[in-house]
Image: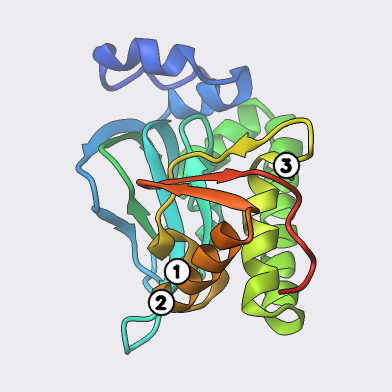
Amino acid sequence: MTDAPRAHPAADALFATLCTGNRLLAQRGMVHRYPKHKVLITEGSTGDTLFVLLAGSVKVYSMDEYGREITYSTVNAGDYFGEMSLDGGVRSASVMTLEPCVCSVLSSNDVRAHLVQHPQFAFSLVEHVIRRARNATAIARNMALLTVYGRVVTLLEGMHGPASDAASVMLRPITHQDIASRVGSSREMVSRLLKDMEKGGYIELGVKRITLLKKLPPRW
């Protein structure tokens, strides 16, 4: 058995950026390009496809009937998603592109064939699922035990670590709505907290930019 040929020669440069394990997996799939804000997976739907993200980023989220959203995580180029449905069950969350994306899309049969030829990849897949399960557990714990302020602090300081007297920390571009979706709150509540933190000299706000100036207090 040999690896399936790549379906899109122009994707060679993108395949080259992947780690060896993910590159061999991606080479079995069909390459697709998606625009920004394209829903790739819908929560509750059935499907057995796995996506290896070659370029761009996506968010994993759920939304209720009132349009309220909770974002579980962001997946960046080099990683893969959709593995939770390989057992034939329904999708546990939705996935939407945050920017134009390129993905290699594989069926469950493609993944099984890959595991037969590369059994060591099974360990990587198990570790991947464990990391996502731990992240889901942490989100559930924070939602149950922390205040909105506590969840905001956990999110902001969890990106690149807390600031110190010796060094500030500039976070990657993020909006107030992004934060609200990640912590399960309203944008208005998040905006008020951030403004108060700015007045207290703990952060500096810019356009889609937040700089941590000193360690955030555990309570507000």
Q: What is the quadrant of residue 96 in the picture?
A: bottom left
The numbered disc on residue 191 is: 1
Q: Residue at x 59, y 20 (%)?
A: 19
Residue 66: image x %, image y %?
Answer: 32, 89
Report helix, strand or loop for mark 1: helix
Q: Is residue 111 left or right of residue 129?
A: left
| Residue 143, above or below 153 | below
For label 2, count other residues whose C-alpha is less than 10 Å away and answer few (under 14), some (14-19) or many (20+).
few
Report helix, strand or loop for mark 3: loop
Q: Which residue is mark 2?
A: 188
Question: Amino acid type of disc 1?
Answer: Ser
| Residue 72, above or below 44 | above
The residues bearing labels 2 and 3 have C-alpha atoms spaced at a distance of 25 Å
Tell me whether the residue at label 3 lies in contact with that at label 1, contact meaning CB atoms closer than 8 angstroms: no
Residue 176: image x %, image y %?
Answer: 42, 61
Residue 11: image x %, image y %?
Answer: 31, 17
